[in-house]
Image (tube, rainbow, N blue to C red):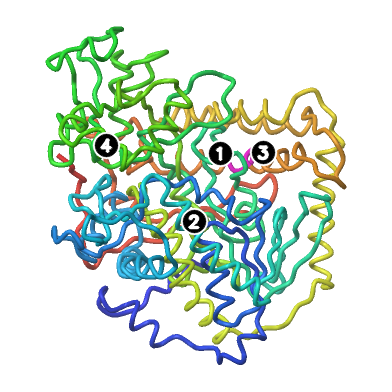
Amino acid sequence: MKLDSKIPSGPLQQKWERYRLEMKLVNPANKRKFDVIVVGSGLAGASAAASLAELGYNVKCFCFHDSPRRAHSIAAQGGINAAKNYQNDGDSVYRLFYDTIKGGDFRAREANVYRLAQVSVNIIDQCVAQGVPFAREYGGLLANRSFGGAQVSRTFYARGQTGQQLLIGAYQALERQIGLGRCQMFPMTEMLDLVVVDGQAKGIVSRSLATGAVSLHAADAVVLATGGYGNVFYLSTNAKGCNVTATFRAYKRGAAFGNPCYTQIHPTCIPVSGDHQSKLTLMSESLRNDGRVWVPKKKGDQRRPHEISEGERDYYLERKYPSYGNLAPRDISSRAAKEVCDEGRGVGPGGLGVYLDFADAIKRLGEKAIQERYSNLFEMYERITGESAYETPMRIYPAVHYTMGGLWVDYNLMSTLPGLFVIGEANFSDHGANRLGASALMQGLADGYFILPSTIGNYFGSTKQSKVSANHAEFRKVEEDVKARLQKLLSIRGKRTVTSFHRELGKLVWDKCGMARNEKGLQEALRQIPALREEFWQNVNVLGEGGELNQSLEQAGRVADFMEFAELLCLDALTRAESCGGHFREEFQTEDGEALRNDEQFSFVSAWEYRGAGKPPVLHKEPLTYEEVKMAQRSYK
């Protein structure tokens, strides 16, 4: 396997525009000759499917929900970044680029990140034209707020439901193309494998979640927009359906997996309340604009928050990072919360929580102003905890939220498999070892609306295409593999539920490869995961039959893939003997407890190649070279 990032030559600021001028184009009349499959209908998938259909390609879009509008993108709360500089506070394309590179701890590809910052300004115009109801100031101008890792206000938002409003915009664009007959929608349909013919991605094998029917779909290119793999930890802020299956199936068909150990822990989530929970709830990072994070100075202080005086409180983020305060980046804020809780100063049941206090903001701005900004988030918090954040501080604690790792892609967003494009959270490309808040929506829409529609045409225009139908022998072979796997899951009839295995795997991965990792724990995980996987295939109990609606079977297939993927995640974490961003190895930290990178040995992208069952994957390295920025120890103090 050879990694070719295909980064264009020339000055960083001119690479994308120059590259677009050099791209091969497809005549509008010829675009009708090309078929494209888009798997996923969140922000990246819906925007890509709508844009490609608008250009004239024949598009099929697949999602496992009953409607594209149920994609997990709706759960994004806080906002979307763009370098518009509407606040005239010093923002620019370059500053957004640098903040993203620095926030990712200098482990992202420079050219991709600069392009993302450039395209960000177009996204807002696109969404406003679609009618997305961004918040506005009194005079009617679009409003902005701040997010972690930045000292400017560049985040556009729609109260605490930005993802939902952006998805409605992309969804209506998609529905327009469906109505025009340019895009076929396949709801309640899950991709179970990728079909590769003569070294090119040529289609997928899917299963209807309503009837259980397995079907074959051929195309000239396949686009994966299937999100991240955070649910390998079992408890995360991701929707329960989020999984690694599509990207992991592609990995096993020849696509390299990039940086799987880069997982993001979000600092503001509602703490775990018991073993009964199946997921966790995010409280938007935007709350840290007005909320102050603190814990008691005294260990084991069980008093109610209003009984603890100002002098007895430790506003630890403001103390440790005075330049950024409560808006320090997510990885740093999460580790700081873990640190004070490990010291015995945490609050709430089990001491696994810190306070997010709005008393000062309410006193300064008034309760009505806080309601206008965050009322739906406060309402959500009260429904879950029974406490009003207007009257008492929120209790928060870090939780798994996002994955920076994903399938390796080049500058064109194409994987190591020709014809397989990967966009949004499903790829590794833009965030390095830590994503800044409000940048996930930016990347998903940049990939779908602006980048992929250009680069996929370049692929069609420069690559000899042979039409393949679903009757090809390779499609039949992959179909047999899929059916055999489903039947094997149904035939075990063991004694343990799928959920019990998933919960045990998630706890193991969280304990050994979560917010903090070390060599001993990772080696233990790599011994325990194969044993748990073996037990799964001998003792799992999958109820029902294959030819029907069967959520137990759906879940079993996804957990089976997590059982294999977890080993790759821990192997990558063990191999990367440094700390960077969300990958925090306890052996590698500065004197004051910050992540300590090793740029001499680890300034590269890890790209893992699957070599077959029972064989260890092979690590390939894409060196990271910086023309514009100088790598330095991150400081937010």
| Residue 542 higher or lower than 557, as above or below | above
Please give left or right for residue 35 compared with residue 509 in the image: right
The residue that appears at 24% across and 68% down in the rendered structure is 627
> What is the CA distance from the residue labelled 2 to the residue labelled 4?
50 Å
**Disc marking residue 559:** 3
Is the residue under label 4 in contact with that under label 1 (CB below 8 Å)?
A: no
Query: Is 20 situated above or below 172?
Result: below
Label 4 secondary element? helix
Evaluate whether residue 612 shows in this view: yes
Q: Which mark is residue 471?
A: none
Q: Nearer the viewer, residue 197 or 158?
A: 158
- Which residue is found at the position 28% from the left and 44% from the top? 597
Label 4 CA crowd tier, 10 Å (few <14, some 14–19, many 20+): few
Relative to 122, residue 386 above or below: above
Quadrant in which the C terminus appears:
top left
Mark 2 or mark 4: which comes first in sequence?
Answer: 4
Quadrant where the N terminus is found in the figure: bottom right
Q: Nearer the viewer, mark 2 or mark 4?
A: 4
State which tag comes first along the sequence, 1 or 2: 1
Residue 536 pos. (x, y %): 73, 31
Crowd band around label 2 with a 10 angstrom C-alpha radius: few (<14), some (14–19), many (20+): many
Identify the mark nearer the N-term, 3 or 1. 1
Report which residue position mark 2 lands on: 607
Q: Which mark is residue 368?
A: 4
Q: Amino acid at mark 2?
A: Ala
- How much space separates mark 4 and mark 3, taking CA atoms? 45 Å
Amino acid type indicated by mark 4: Lys
Q: Give the extent of the magenta segment.
A: 562-567
Q: Which residue: 56% across, 39% down?
A: 231
Q: CA distance from mark 1 to mark 2?
A: 21 Å
Neighbourhood count class around disc 3 (C-alpha, 10 Å): few under 14, some 14–19, many 20 upward: many
Residue 588 highlighted magenta (yes or no):
no
